[in-house]
Image (cartoon, grey):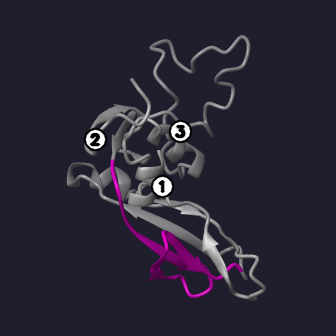
Amino acid sequence: MPLYSQDDGATFGWSSLEFDANKGKPGYKPPNPLKLPAPVPLNQKPTLADFKENGRYCKSGLAYPASDYLAVCTSFTEMMYYDATTKKTTKLKEVDGAYKCSPEDQANVCQLRFKIDPAYDEYTDATGTSRGYVENQCKCALDGGVDSGYCTSTLGTDKYRKAV
């Protein structure tokens, strides 16, 4: 399948880099006899690297796991900021294609949200997972501001789509 070629809603096999870490190494053998890609184990969180790897086949650059072995191309909807102390999320505003946040506490994370087909809600909303959003860090903006930072990923946004 050509890279960055599939429209939103296209499906293909999901592969988790985190749980198939030996992929590509000499002597690698797939994790099962059917040679299916490594799944996202129950109650595990896909990593930013997993979303990027699978999104390489989508025009938007973003795909989500709809089941243990199914990926769906999708697009960005909003960026949220999760405060680990208060356990609350707030919507971040876009500023020139980026999302400002406070990097003071690295337990706080940005949550890149995306469109999810209702048919896959049960899987993406499973307790203890983050299959319904992409967690990414807030990093310093290096502009001298104590609480000035930006979310590290803009996967699936219009700006990202145009760049790939």
Where, by quadrant of the figure, is residue 66 drawn? top left
Q: Are marks 2 and 3 in contact (CB under 8 Å)?
A: no
Which stretch appears magenta?
A: 74-103
According to the picture, the residue beneath numbered tag 1 turns out to be 155
Which residue is outermost to the left? 119
The numbered dot on residue 7 is: 2
Tell me which amino acid carries mark 1: Leu
Residue 136: image location, x then y, percent? 59, 62
| Alpha-carbon span between mark 2 and mark 1 | 15 Å
| Alpha-carbon span between mark 1 and mark 3 | 11 Å
The numbered dot on residue 53 is: 3
Q: Nearer the viewer, residue 72 or 68?
A: 72
Write the residue at 21% across / 49% down.
119
SS state under label 1: loop
- Horizontal side, residue 91 vs residue 138: left or right: left
Residue 29: image location, x then y, percent? 62, 14
Say if 113 sits above or below 30 in the image.
below
Where, by quadrant of the figure, is residue 23 drawn? top right
